[in-house]
Amino acid sequence: MTQELILQDNRAVVAGNLNNWLDRFFMFIDVKAKSADTYKKATKQFMKYLAENGITEPTRDTIISWREYLRAEHKPTTIQLYLTAVKLFFSWLEQEGVYKNIANKVKGIRIEKGHKKDYLTSKQSKEVLDDIDTTTAKGKRDFAIVALLLTTGLRTIEVVRADVADLRTVADSTVLFIQGKGKDEKNDYVKVAPQVEKALREYLKTRDSLNDNEPLFTSTSNENKGERLTTRTISKIAKTSLVNAGLNSDRLTAHSFRHTAGTLALLNGAELTQVKELLRHEQIQTTLIYTHNIDRAKNNSEALVANAIFSME
């Protein structure tokens, strides 16, 4: 019996029990914990959709309908992640001879290139830092975090993973070794500017102990004092600093600091390849988005047209 016939025979039997295959699927896939959590969330959403609509034998049209259903409440990037997970699930089911790959060649969501978050000008960056109260241990910590984010373009998870021992020296520079996105080891580093190093040292002086394996940044609250910060806390610190500086916008978040580092580096003479290295982009095309934004910002065509029109008065 061919695999196609096996699939046809098994389809009606397995269709109502797809949930039972999920655990096996998650044991099969070899991805990091965060990706696994995303896949689980996506497939659970899909199973919920099937149950709510009384669908026991999903087809290709079911996948397409679910995709359109997701458009109402989710961002394109989220929908794309969900589709990727479900596509992988049905691809695996077909490999196992369990169910036809109904998600094969279903189109994903078009995601526009460009940044979803804005960046800060150098003046705004200075104002954000100046508005942080550094008279307390918490303030010294927050100032050091924001300064580090703004000048190095670190991701929040990279800041969270940093330990005291990661602050080291390479050649004549103070650097911070980091465990980057998708990496298993701390085999890369960012240079720490003298002003930022000073802020870090001032903050570290407020700590009771400084063992090498301790987190670089810790909580100052009574409930979990001394424990490693979370990405949510880092994001909140960044957002609070923005709001306090009068920059309260949905398009300004902790990730805006990363865009700020890349943009200001290019505006102040850095080469494209240098910014790629700074932000640790895998593809140069990702870095090119920064140059496109800068080139467009420098394009004064609208002013030229306006001058041509209003100068006729």
Image (tube, grey):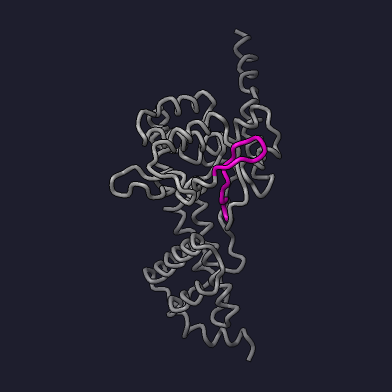
In this rendering, the count of numbered labels is 0
Above or below, 204 relative to 124: below
Which residue is farthest top? 313
Expressed as whole percent of the image width and height from the top left, the position of residue 112 reads 58, 46
- Residue at the spot x=41%, y=47% of the render? 229
Q: Is residue 179 magenta?
A: yes
Which residue is farthest left? 222
Expressed as whole percent of the image width and height from the top left, the position of residue 221 reads 31, 44
Q: Main secondary structure of the magenta part?
A: strand
Above or below, 212 relative to 206: below
Which residue is farthest bottom? 1
- Residue at the spot x=46%, y=75% of the render? 23
Above or below, 181 relative to 29: above
Expressed as whole percent of the image width and height from the top left, the position of residue 109 reads 56, 55
The one nearer the camera, 250 or 158, is: 158
The one nearer the camera, 162 or 58, is: 162
Above or below, 257 relative to 82: above
Q: Quadrant of residue 269?
A: top right
- Name the image quarter holding the N terminus: bottom right
The one nearer the camera, 145 or 302, is: 145
Expressed as whole percent of the image width and height from the top left, the position of residue 253 reads 46, 39
Q: Is residue 133 magenta?
A: no
Q: Quadrant of residue 173?
A: top right
- Residue at the spot x=44%, y=38% of the render? 204
- Name the image quarter holding the C terminus: top right
The one nearer the camera, 257 or 19, is: 257
Q: Which residues are magenta?
A: 167-182
Task: Classify residue 241 as left or right of residue 179.
Answer: left
